[in-house]
Image (cartoon, rainbow, N blue to C red):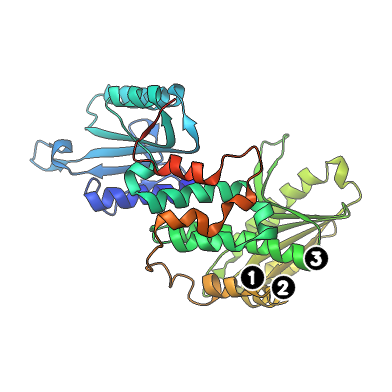
Amino acid sequence: MTESILLPAVRDWARELGIASYDTIALRGDADSPPRVGTFAWDLTAPSYLQPMVRRAQDGKPKPGFLVCDVVSGEEIDAAAVSAFTRKCSLMAGMKKMPPVLPVFIADRFSRDPFNLGRSQGVMVATPGALFGHDVAVGLAALLRTLTKAAAIAVKRPELIGELFDRLGRIEGAAANLRGALFELLVGHCVVKMDDGTIDIGKMILDRESGERAEIDVFRVKEHRDVWSYECKAHQPGEIVGVASIESWVTKKVPLIYRVLRRESRFQGTSFHFEFWTCGSFSEEALMLLRKAAERTQKYTLSWKDGPGVRAYAAKVRPKAVAEMLDEHFFAHPLARLDRGIDPASKFVGAIDLGDFFDGNDMDPDVLARAWVSQDTVEAQ
């Protein structure tokens, strides 16, 4: 998640400085395969028309160089990681007719040796704090720690992601990713409050026989007699879920999750339930497919909720803060707050009280924040 926020921030940085051609920046996750320059995949690529990067073709037309960037979040970078990145750069530089390339490697923290290794190889190495300043860097740090405690936060304080939404939403592209995380936490909070049980957020499923993977957005178990898997789509109210999305869910994802879970000994004799929740609506074709699938399926139950259904369900939860958050971020002009100013970063960590979700073995949130936003790119060992 933090990388999905950080990459749009890097894109904005490259646009603002004129390092990359404005509308041609490609990000990992925007397409089925990652962007490539040379024979290598990168997290971000873009043609660059900066004067040192441009070469001329025989007809005199400019040929751009390229900006390439890899991003790693959630850990301090060691020499092996930097060496892998510089190796990619060296191999690419040795290719015939390869245009000039500006390589950038971004990570939360660098110890001194990896940092010096990157610089010695002509690579730009940086932390989020060095590139974007206090507010974005601290927000990303808080988001990372929040998502590691997603299930606990969903039960105790789902508004935390809403506060992060307010502070990170000004990054172009961040709002959609944060809305997805917020919606999952709100759904998790609602189903526990209304229907009891324990939950997990973002549970990964692996079929060891086929190698197929799937993610359960919200997973709820009630007394080991009922298992619920919720597919959460944080659409805007005007968006329509089409038949292709439902067909993929009904014919691929649900059977895969059911096949894996029913093999677990703890779920023997358990009833399985699958629900599709959206803040938008379903097309008539999608609804027809859902109804037919629900009628013919005997192994498990299938059900769904559209925007009004989600809002009505959340309205029953007390206190009313959850329904109010749904209104603010999803049903009542969900993107209206993007251009609002952001509180000073010095108030950020205290305002969201991350300490409630750190146990004795975790890094103190204030220390974590300072590590991200330190003016010194390198952390002394």
Mark 3 or mark 1: name the one nearer the start of the chain.
Answer: 3
Q: Which mark is residue 72?
A: none
Amino acid type at image mark 3? Asp
Amino acid type at image mark 2? Val
Q: Quadrant of residue 338?
A: bottom left
Q: Nearer the viewer, mark 3 or mark 2?
A: 2
Q: CA distance from mark 2 to mark 1?
A: 7 Å
Q: CA distance from mark 3 to mark 2?
A: 11 Å
Secondary structure category for the residue under label 1: helix
Q: Which mark is residue 195?
A: 3
Residue drawn at x 58%, y 51% as measured from the top left: 146
Horizontal side of 233 relative to 188 (left or right) equals left
The x and y percentages for residue 266 are 87, 44
Amino acid type at image mark 1? Val
Q: Nearer the viewer, residue 325 or 271?
A: 325
Dots 2 and 1: beta carbons under 8 Å? yes
The x and y percentages for residue 114 are 39, 24
Within 10 Å of disc 1 (Cα), the crowding (few <14, some 14-19, many 20+) is: many
Q: Which mark is residue 322?
A: 1
Q: Nearer the viewer, residue 58 or 112?
A: 112
Mark 2 or mark 1: name the one nearer the start of the chain.
Answer: 2
Secondary structure category for the residue under label 2: loop
Horizontal side of 366 relative to 313 (left or right) equals left
Dots 3 and 1: beta carbons under 8 Å? no
- Could you tell me which quadrant the C terminus lies in? top left
What residue is pinned by disc 2?
Answer: 317
